[in-house]
Amino acid sequence: MTAVQQSSTGPGPGGTGLAGATLLRAGLYVRHVRHRRFLARTCQYLLLAILSVTVVINVMFIMDTSRKLQEDSPSQEGRHNALHLQDSLPKTLTIEVVSSQSKVSVTVDGTTILDDSEDNKGRGIHVLVLNQATGSVMAQRMFDTYSPHEDEAMALFLNMVSDGRVLIFTIKDEGTFQMKQPARDLLKRLGSKKSHVISWRDMWGMVTQKGGKMYGETYSKSPEFNSWGAPVLLKVEVPLVPVEDSECDWPDNEENQRRRAFCNHIEGYGSVCSCADPAPLTFSPEPVPNNRVKDVPVAIVASNRPHYLYRMLRSLLSAHGVNPRMITVFIDGYFEEPLEVTKLFNIRGIQHTPIGMKNARISQHYKASLTATFNLFPDAQYAIVIEEDLDVSPDFFSYFSQTLRLLEEDDSIYCISAWNDQGYEHTSEDPAQLYRVETMPGLGWILKRSLYKEELEPRWPTPEKLWDWDMWMRLPDVRKGRECIVPDVSRTYHFGSSGLNMNSYFQDVYFKKHAFNTQPAVQLKEIDSVKKDNYEQVIHDLLRRAIVLDHSKSPCEENFIPDTKGEVYCHVLQDELASEISLRGSKLPREEKAIFS
């Protein structure tokens, strides 16, 4: 133990060498640290010196520049005036417009804002609206003026655009076949010199300011019937105005904040953006007594048709008994303008990711909307479904409030609809009358949560099936013999003339002549009569007292049905699916059935 202690700590030769080495290393470390500190201070002094020299040089440069500017300008006041004049010089937009058989395009300051060169699409007149202060695109529309009534739609849109906006027009393929004189006169008032001579397959472009200056117009005539006019290019310079000159000075309140946010960025909505007399955005319709649908959610199924949605919402929010908190607009796609319309009215709007193609996409949108509705309102036992292209009557909610109990009391009822497929102006006149029908009319209807969650949702057609959702709901194995309730006079009116399965011709032929109730407080009569057993008795009673029509006459003759009031007439038609039907106690031949009018 003693030997070990001496070798490690004693004054022997090994201990002395170890201590000396330790002291030597410590000395070297101290010198190294002092050297590093010296170098660091030296670098700091050098950087400070460089910074000081830079500051001095910059100050001298600024002073020299100021002296030269003062020498070049007679006075400081003159310099200020020169700069002010420079700032106030008008800025301009360079707009280029192309019109041709296969392509239209619009370019603003080198940026393309319209380019339509897709085959077999985009025929007609393309219209763009630019903000006169910023040059931003406020609206973009395409009107197929080869088809009926599209010229009327274009005229309506142009009349709804605010004065001062920059309007750009260009034709693709053909744009005049159905453009009648009123539309041509409107284009003339907007500054066109060619609106009365544009004809079949001519090319045309124009840039003008509504209520202001005409900037330019170009035109190319078709040489013959089977040819198109040569492509044309129009290039114009459009001066911008100060921003304050392009905005309205409305009182600052919550409603006008929504109005301002909408109208400063979107165009084509008429009086809602009027500076002098803006249309109200707040509605105060009469309540519905004992309103049973006050807390029933309303799902509005919408796409990218914002003008339709705007019209529909104004109608819906004006209906008696409306509850805006229960309304949700479901938009099929991430389209900005329909969502802005919902914000304008302070209504809930939800964008849905599109799934599927064509009819399948619409079907999936309905499913997503119904599912989301019942998820948003987990306590709701019913939901009202309505599309964006429908007007609603003042008693829309009153109608559903009075009929809702039928869904609770009669399991044979599939739905209650506000639409009567056979309710034309010449066939329907009693707004208090109800019917049962063996179909699902849609176009504004109410259904039970249990029907959707237990039957429809699990079986809903998948995205790869190009089926119409409403045709699927009418299938016998889906409807299961149940029937829907409809009014004699419809509580909705279909005004939309564009869509996947819609055009202006079909709108004219089928929807335009439908009767539409405008009375605000209709009391429905004999509501219990449309319950299953009661309605069967009603039909039997009608058939027993019906007068058989003269079958020697053609049904196409005007006097086939006598012009009388209060009578019931029976007409017998052959039907391969019909069986024996009793009429006044007798038997009709097989493969015939009776209908009454």
Image (tube, helix red, strand yellow):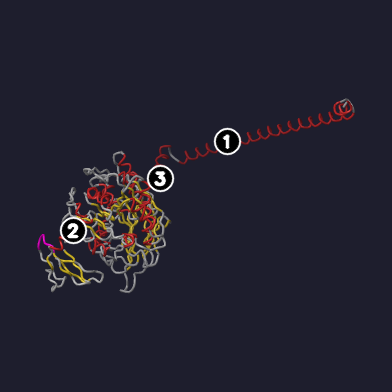
Residue 421: image quadrant is bottom left
Q: Is residue 216 visible?
A: no
Residue 198, horizontal then vertical, whole percent: 28, 66
Taking 466 as reference, is 581 left or right?
left
Residue 16, horizontal then vertical, whole percent: 87, 28
Image disc number at residue 86: 3
Nearest the viewer among 308 and 356 is 356
Look at mark 2 in the image and give the residue it sits on.
Answer: 537
Against 453, is 42 above or below? above
Real-space Cα separation, disc 1 to disc 2, in angstroms:
104 Å
Instruction: Give the label, 1 or 2, closer to the camera.
Output: 2
Badge 3 marks a residue whose secondary structure is helix
What stretch of residues is rendered in magenta? 564-568
Residue 576, horizontal then vertical, whole percent: 25, 72
Residue type, label 2 = Gln
Residue 282, horizontal then vertical, whole percent: 27, 43
Q: Is residue 586 magenta?
A: no
